[in-house]
Image (cartoon, coloured by chain):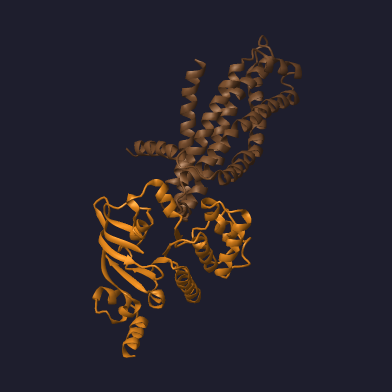
Chain colours: A brown, B orange
Amino acid sequence: MQYLHNFGAYFLMVIEMFRKPTKWSVMKKLILKDIDDLVIGSIGIVSFIAFFVGGVITIQTALNIDNPLIPKSLVGFATRQSILLEFAPTFISIIMAGKVGSFITSSIGTMRVTEQIDALEVMGINSINYLILPKVVALTLYPFVISIAMFLGIFGGYTACVLGGYATSEDFITGVQLDFIPFHIVYAFLKTFVFAFILATVPSYYGYYMKGGALEVGQASTSSFVWTSVAIILLNYILTQLLLS
Amino acid sequence: MIEVKDLQKSFGENHILKGVTTTFEAGKTNLIIGQSGSGKTVFLKCLLGLFDYEKGSISYDGRVFAQLSEAEKRTMRADIGMVFQGSALFDSMTIAENVMFPLRMFTNQSKSEMQDRVDFVLNRVNLSDAHNKMPSEASGGMQKRVAIARAIVNKPKYLFCDEPNSGLDPKTSIVIDNLIKEITEEYNITTVINSHDMNSVMEIGEKIVFLQLGLKEWEGTRHDIFKTENKAVTDFVYSSNLFKKVRKMYLTE
């Protein structure tokens, strides 16, 4: 029953987010601040993870191909497919649920605990619009982060492949270009946009509606990570079924 | 002036306010006192429009809040200033930005006009050199003064304070009490203070409403509270020996 309540309250929050807008001059600054905090601030960790996981994908693929009849270019092909279709959009989003999601939940939750949200409400400000909409708008730039993850993931794979001697540079590049389907990029970015919305709103919900003190802020951050990840995994399945099957 | 008539508020089966009727006049510091759980905070949140209530009415200079349209409610909220128990300053903003916030949200003033007003109110609360400090760098007393500055920057008609002295030393408490009283008289604001602090009651309580178990048990001035024979009030206010002695001295004089 509590799940149903949370589900309904989440959608009401999303509707409320678009009502009674905050002054544009104020909103503009909030959006720029959130772009800095949520998007620019994530590029470093995403780049690091994407580069090295790309390398690991390549090494594992190469080590599992021991049949001499299978061309070495398959390493590049498998790396590209893994990174473009799943690793960059989905698994980076789960990592972001930990980084960005926890940040959003704890910052909004702390505002709740310290009555800052009440202060906004007393002033007649739509606190949901003021706090959450800038995050949603800022995360429309999230596909930019995923583009970097895609590029660096494949580049990490290439580096590991060539340095480890698993395939030649030409083989890897041939594999990366093999049977490329442009719709896969559309699919990846469609998923990314949906996940960006989830990343902005689910952690905000857990922060905004939390009750209690500092301990509960920590608990809300944990719940936020769990449910953001669950939502991303479920939507990943549904979107894949709808768009690729 | 704020008129409250038969205000009733429940949470499920738990009846918090059971019909409170009172009036808070402009230019006076009105205090709500009572034991923990007496309904003070719920009463204040009803006055602020943060809680809906089941029965009764609250009117602000003849405007009944519940009957106003959304646009009218928004306009009316610009007339309300609030000082929260924990100050509730926005910790991502400097002190000057905190004070400027209501001006940025509700007025179309130029940056220099807003800056002038911020300088004026910060000066008024004796914080003329704290503009660029972050709230975390300010002491409890300074934070309260910033909260007062933010509450009055937009020239409100109504000022609400929830436990403005909590966590402050006695000397700073007196400074805050006097500041609230001066501002109330200077700008003819209707001020309502939710307080546990008996010093405040005796220093600035021009009207005191004593709540008990969701009902108005007693009301009067700080002078009346020395003379009252109401047992609930005397048990609460004169629970310490110090205040018993103060009362005795007052009555002897």
Report the residue at 41% width, 66% height from top. B191
Image location of residue B217, percent across then percent down: 25, 69
Number of disc labels? 0
Q: In the figure, is residue A219 to the left or right of A190?
A: left
Image location of residue B3, percent across then percent down: 31, 62
Image location of residue A144, percent across then percent down: 63, 31
Report the residue at 27% width, 60% height from top. B5
Image location of residue A47, percent across then percent down: 66, 34
Examine the rendering and report whether any part of residue B73 can be seen: yes
In-front residue for pair B125/A69: B125
Quarter of the view holding residue A46: top right
Q: In the figure, is residue B151 to the left or right of B253?
A: right
Q: Quadrant of the N terminus of chain A?
A: top left
Farthest residue toward the top? Answer: A69
Q: In the figure, is residue A204 to the left or right of B223?
A: right
Quarter of the view holding residue B192: bottom left
Farthest residue toward the bottom? Answer: B253
Q: Is residue A38 above or below residue A121?
A: above
Report the residue at 35% width, 50% height from top. B68
In-front residue for pair B252/B224: B224
Farthest residue toward the front? Answer: B62
Quarter of the view holding residue B211: bottom left
Q: Is residue A18 above or below residue B2?
A: above
In-front residue for pair A92/B120: B120
Examine the rendering and report whether any part of residue B39 can be seen: no
In-front residue for pair A230/A125: A125
Q: Is residue A240 above or below residue B49?
A: above
Report the residue at 37% width, 82% height from top. B242
